[in-house]
Amino acid sequence: MKQKCSLKLYRNFLIANHNRYSGNELAQVSPDESMAHDSVNRWLLRTDFTPSELWRQVKPLVRPTEGYLVGDDTLLEKPYSRQNELAKVQYSGVRHGQLNGINLVNLLWTSGIEYIPVDYRIYYKQNDDKTKNDHYLEMLNRAEQRGFRPQYVLNDSWYGSVANMKAIDHKGWKWITNLRSNRQVAPLGAKGAYVPVADLDLIDKQVKPVWLKEYGTVLVCQTVDTKGDVTYLATNDLELIDYGTFLGHWDRRWKIEELHRGLKQTTGIAKCYSTKAGEQRTHIFAAFSAFIQLEKQRLRTGVAWYEQKAQITRQATGAYLRSA
C-alpha cells in the first residue's frame, strides 16, 4: 500500500507550522483529505533516514576546501517524556542544570555566511557505548573522507581535549578551541612549570606561545565580555599572532549556536510527541531537512528563516481577516 505521508510533505509541514507538530495536526491540514494520523505515525516509524542522507542534500551547498567546521552539541528538551526511548537526564548548557532530553552532536560548515549542518549524531551511550567526543571524532573522520580541508576546526572546551587536538593535527588541519580556566600551561622557556591558564600573565589583546600540558606548543589569548567573564582561547596555528584575526576566526563558532536556535524555533525539532526511537529519529532528520530548505531560501533571497515562516502565517491571517 502506498504511503500517504512523505519526507516532502512532512518537511513542508514543519516549515509551515509554528507550535503544533503532531501527526494528528498534519492529517487535518494534509492536501490528501483521506490521510489519518496513523499514516503519519507509520511513516515516521518505518522510514530510516541516516545522516548520510543529510550529506547528500547539503553537498552542493558547501565548499569543502574553504571555511570552517564547527562542532558542538545541543539538548532537545523532553521534560515530561520519561518513557522516550532516546531521552535521558543530562546536562543542559542553556538551563545550566540536569534536564531530560535528547542530545544531538552536530557538525556545521560555514564560510562565515552559511549555516550548513553537514553531519549529526544522536548521543545515547546506552545504545552504542559512544561518548559525545567519540561521535565528534567520527564526524570529523567522515568529513575528511568527504574531502573537507577546512581553514579551521572550531569547538568549545568540551571538545578541546588533547586527544581531539592531536586527532585534528593528524589530518593536517588547524583548530581553535576555548580552554577551561584550569588547563595547565607553561612558558616556553620553563617547560614543566605548569600553571592554570587563568594564572598566565596575559596583557590585553596579547597572543602568547605556551606549552600546553600533554600536547605541545600552542598560542593562547583571552577575551573579556561586557559582563567581565573571561574566555581563554588556544590554537595550533602558530602563525595566528594577530589578536584581531584570531578573534575573527573564533567568532565563526557562534554560527553553531545560531543553528541550534534556528532548528528549535523554525522546525519543531524537539516537538515530536512519540516515545518511539524510530519516530524520533525520522522527525529529527526531517527537521534538519526542513532547516536546509529555509537556509537555501535565505541564501537565494536574503529573507531570514523566521520571516519566511512569518510570511506563511501572515497570508493565513490576512485571509481570515478579509473573510471575517
Image (tube, rainbow, N blue to C red):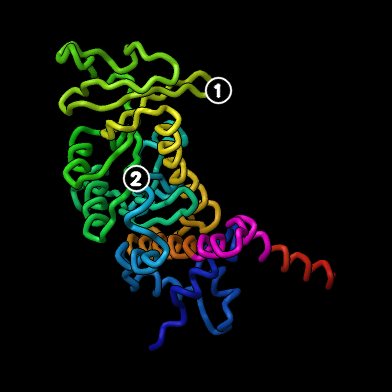
Residue under label 1, please give it. 226
User: Who's the residue at 38% across and 88% down the image?
Assistant: 1
Task: Tell me the element at label 2.
Answer: strand
Instruction: Answer with mark 1 or mark 2, whichever residue precedes in sequence.
Output: 2
Q: Visible in this render: residue 78?
A: no
Return the residue nearer the eye: 273 or 93. 93
The vertical placement of 302 against 212, above or below, is below
Residue numbers of the magenta segment = 293-312
Mark 1 to mark 2 CA distance (whole Å) = 25 Å
Res. 187 image quadrant? top left
Q: Say whether residue 193 is left or right of residue 258.
A: left
Relative image position of residue 48 (x, y in whole percent):
31, 70
Amino acid residing under circle 1: Thr
The vertical placement of 144 against 136, above or below, is below
Relative image position of residue 135 (x, y in whole percent):
25, 49
Relative image position of residue 39 (x, y in whole percent):
45, 77
User: Who's the residue at 25% across and 27% down the image?
Assistant: 218
User: Who's the residue at 14% across and 14% down the image?
Assistant: 192
User: Who's the residue at 49% across and 51% down the image?
Assistant: 113
Return the residue nearer the eye: 282 or 64. 64
The vertical placement of 91 against 145, above or below, is above
Relative image position of residue 122 (x, y in whole percent):
31, 53
Q: Are marks 1 and 2 in contact (CB under 8 Å)?
A: no
Q: Residues within 10 Å of mark 2 (few under 14, many from 20)?
A: many
Q: Visible in this render: residue 312?
A: yes
Task: Tell me the element at label 1.
Answer: loop
Magenta stretch: residue 48 in it?
Answer: no
Amino acid residing under circle 2: Gly
> Residue 71, which numbered label?
2
Q: Main secondary structure of the magenta part?
A: helix
Return the residue nearer the eye: 283 or 117. 117
